[in-house]
């Protein structure tokens, strides 16, 4: 990328009419830089090049815990393939055998094409064969690259199967092989849900044919211990699971996800809680992914990304049953998905739940920096004092009453203190499993953070909605009133506010319908709070009439087009706010100003496509590119060019300005903080903070 030699702040009229521009978020709002020669709908694939990668010594070890073979391929990819190709350790754990009805064939029987006989054990083996081929192809380019298969001991005297890719011994698959529910939604006792909720004392295994392991039945506590044992063996620094609390969808407003997805994620949560209490483990981060729900949402990947993802599924699906490349009589893959390798709009997207905030970095009153993340299910606080020659202190961890979820937001209060907000999960059976909003505040400006305070949650998000709750968005208006906003499991927006005396209100309903992802909030230059939240078709907005006034109980349409619904960013801009979002089926970053003056003009910022939210500061923009790595671009006199840091990240980057300096931060999959100063000439140089 050619670095910018100067900074331009053109008028909004020039911004809208003449340039593909980027608005960069600072502590006081947006700073706008022009990229001459662009258009209002620049093709993200043109005029943009990536320069050389910046070498970083990231040492992550990733663990994926899923219910069935193919959950990772459909819902975690392309992140799975990015990790495999990084050359760093990755282990995927499959809790059930995924035996289903045992029929390894696409579609239904037709005249002349009868269905093969049901054989659950052989179907489970065929799915294992398909996963091994898919992982081998992603890692080596050769689906026949061989594996070593052994059994390893687990809790209670049983064993699990461990497969290791011979060409890359850091890549492992673990098969626990418990019985799957065999029903997507129906409450059947012999299932992970039944085991979690105490309907059965233990869940029986269902061994795949040909496995070297001898799996056994596990109680709830034993299954948790099995997962803890695997964590101790592989020492992950980043754990991926599916969403333990999916939202309701569709006309019937039903939970649209497989029950095994939900409860494998809850068992992973319980195991992580126990693992975090053990000594000697590395710090870890957690990322959860939407499952079936993503079918109803705009695509996050461009065509090339979706096609590449589907090609991996095709390898798993054993598209040509005459090709017995695995040498198994059970079959070399899962023929059930061979007639739909894109799934139900699954290959076209990857979507995180509660990990899209770009407001987790704050400037201190003294010019220092405070960054906030979730390590070991606790709040991690990194601090760089002012005038310390770019030295960061190691993170300090603060526990909440419960498990702190991924996805934090922060805000600086009028007196200079910083407040951090997140959600916390309380594990339990049935309705005892719940999520609530929590907050902690500095006891004085620049000082330590006090204990967490629980703010509860809207009553409409209870057990009937599986306790789905977005990450919070927070803003302080010109009167000093602090308000937090969340999306509930009923896909509406809720608020809770604090008055000048520190008293919190009850939760209030702000309406909206069909909201997805996390809301975003900011305060404009007049001191009015604005909130934005996405639907599959557009973005809805709420705005105060004046500081101190209540927000309307009904949203206003923004006039914006459809977005990918996750990863909205917002900042003050003249008389309104500027919103950043990703374009569906492209991943290009787009922006528009919302000021109530008419239909907003959408500016396509060009650059490489990607997914997830982008972090912005006074001189640069950072986000995940199509290959998953952290990309950064400075303002340029020509088309933007991106520098890749070869760093895979957890969540989204964040950025702020302090005086003339801009700073960007990101958390790597090694659970370490990385940062870059953007006031230097040339491309921002990403550095590792201590810890």
Image (cartoon, rainbow, N blue to C red):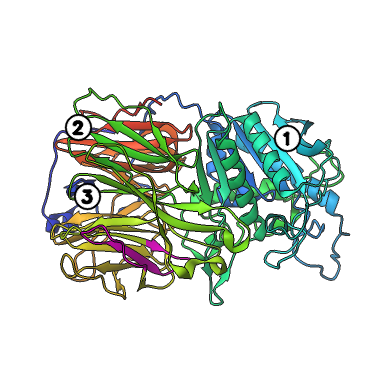
Q: Is residue 302 visible?
A: no
- Location of mark 2 (residue): 679
Q: CA distance from mark 3 to mark 1?
A: 58 Å
Q: Residues within 10 Å of mark 3 (few under 14, many from 20)?
A: some
- Location of mark 3 (residue): 413
- The quadrant in which the C terminus is found is top left
Task: Give how far across and how far down residue 580 sits, in percent.
Answer: 30, 54
Kindly identify the residue that appears in the image at 34 percent across and 43 percent down: 450
Mark with earlier residue (3, 1) = 1
Describe the element under mark 1 as helix, strand or loop. loop
Please tell me whether residue 385 is drawn above or below residue 16 in the rendered image: above
- Location of mark 1 (residue): 144
Task: Give how far across and how far down residue 162 sits, in percent.
Answer: 74, 34
Mark with earlier residue (2, 3) = 3
**Residue 497 drawn in magenta:** yes
Describe the element under mark 2 as helix, strand or loop. loop
Q: Is residue 232 rendered to the left or right of residue 646? A: right
Q: CA distance from mark 2 to mark 1?
A: 49 Å
Q: Which residues are magenta?
A: 486-507
Task: Give how far across and how far down residue 389 sits, in percent.
Answer: 22, 22
Kindly identify the residue that appears in the image at 23 percent across and 67 percent down: 543
Q: Is residue 62 rendered to the left or right of residue 665? A: right
Kindly identify the residue that appears in the image at 41 percent across and 70 percent down: 492
Q: Residues within 10 Å of mark 1 (few under 14, many from 20)?
A: some
Q: Is residue 368 visible?
A: yes
Quarter of image, res 53: top left
For the residue pair 216 and 425, the one nearer the viewer reads as: 425
Please tell me whether residue 115 is drawn above or below residue 276 in the rendered image: below
């Amino acid at each position: 990328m050619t670095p910018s030699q100067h900074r331009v702040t053109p008028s909004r009229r020039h911004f809208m009419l003449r340039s593909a521009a980027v608005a960069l978020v600072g502590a006081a709002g947006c700073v706008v830089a022009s990229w001459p020669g662009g258009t209002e709908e620049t093709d993200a694939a043109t005029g943009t090049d990536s320069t050389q990668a910046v070498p970083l010594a990231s040492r992550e070890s990733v663990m994926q815990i899923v219910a069935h073979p193919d959950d990772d391929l459909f819902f975690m990819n392309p992140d799975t393939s990015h990790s495999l190709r990084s050359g760093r350790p990755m282990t995927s754990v499959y809790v059930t055998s995924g035996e289903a009805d045992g029929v390894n064939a696409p579609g239904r029987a037709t005249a002349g094409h009868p269905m093969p006989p049901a054989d659950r054990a052989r179907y489970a083996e065929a799915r294992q064969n398909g996963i091994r081929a898919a992982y081998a192809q992603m890692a080596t380019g050769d689906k026949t690259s061989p594996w070593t298969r052994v059994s390893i001991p687990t809790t209670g005297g049983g064993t699990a199967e461990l497969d290791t890719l011979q060409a890359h011994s850091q890549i492992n698959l673990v098969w626990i092989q418990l019985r799957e529910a065999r029903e997507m939604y129906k409450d059947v006792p012999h299932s992970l849900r039944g085991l979690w909720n105490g309907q059965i004392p233990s869940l029986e295994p269902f061994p795949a044919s040909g496995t070297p392991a001898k799996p056994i039945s596990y109680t709830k506590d034993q299954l948790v211990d099995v997962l803890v044992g695997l964590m101790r063996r592989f020492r992950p620094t980043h754990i991926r699971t599916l969403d333990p609390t999916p939202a309701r969808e569709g006309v019937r407003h039903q939970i649209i996800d497989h029950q095994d997805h939900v409860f494998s994620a809850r068992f992973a949560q319980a195991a992580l809680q126990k693992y975090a209490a053990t000594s000697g483990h590395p710090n870890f981060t957690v990322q959860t992914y939407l499952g079936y729900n993503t079918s109803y949402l705009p695509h996050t990947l461009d065509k090339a990304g979706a096609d590449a993802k589907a090609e991996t599924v095709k390898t798993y699906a054993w598209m040509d049953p005459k090709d017995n490349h695995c040498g198994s009589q059970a079959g070399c893959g899962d023929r059930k998905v061979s007639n739909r390798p894109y799934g139900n709009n699954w290959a076209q997207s990857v979507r995180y739940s509660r990990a899209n905030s770009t407001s987790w970095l704050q400037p201190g009153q003294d010019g220092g920096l405070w960054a906030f993340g979730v390590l070991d299910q606790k709040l991690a606080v990194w601090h760089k004092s002012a005038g310390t020659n770019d030295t960061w202190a190691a993170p300090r961890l603060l526990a909440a009453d419960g498990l702190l979820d991924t996805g934090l937001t922060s805000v600086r209060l009028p007196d200079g203190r910083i407040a951090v907000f997140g959600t916390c999960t309380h594990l339990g059976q049935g309705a005892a499993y719940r999520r609530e909003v929590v907050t902690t505040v500095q006891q004085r400006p620049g000082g330590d953070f006090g204990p967490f305070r629980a703010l509860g949650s809207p009553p409409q998000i209870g057990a009937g909605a599986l306790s789905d709750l977005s990450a919070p968005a927070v803003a302080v208006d010109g009167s000093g009133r602090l308000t937090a906003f969340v999306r509930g499991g009923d896909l509406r927006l809720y608020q809770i506010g604090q008055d000048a005396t520190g008293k919190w209100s009850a939760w209030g309903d702000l309406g909206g319908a069909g909201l997805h992802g996390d809301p975003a909030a900011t305060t404009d230059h007049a001191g009015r709070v604005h909130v934005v939240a996405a639907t599959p078709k557009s973005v809805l907005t709420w705005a105060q009439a004046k500081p101190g006034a209540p927000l309307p109980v009904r949203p206003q349409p923004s006039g914006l087009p459809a977005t990918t619904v996750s990863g909205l960013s917002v900042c003050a801009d003249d008389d309104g706010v500027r919103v950043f979002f990703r374009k569906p089926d492209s991943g290009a970053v787009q922006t528009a100003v919302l000021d109530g003056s008419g239909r907003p003009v959408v500016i396509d910022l060009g650059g490489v496509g990607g997914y997830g939210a982008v972090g912005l500061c006074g001189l640069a923009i950072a986000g995940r590119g199509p290959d998953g790595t952290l990309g950064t671009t400075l303002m340029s006199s020509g088309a933007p060019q991106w520098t890749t840091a070869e760093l895979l990240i957890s969540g989204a980057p964040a950025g702020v300005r302090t005086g003339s300096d801009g700073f960007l931060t990101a958390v790597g999959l090694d659970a370490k903080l990385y940062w870059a100063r953007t006031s230097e000439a040339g491309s921002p140089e990403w550095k590792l903070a201590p810890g």
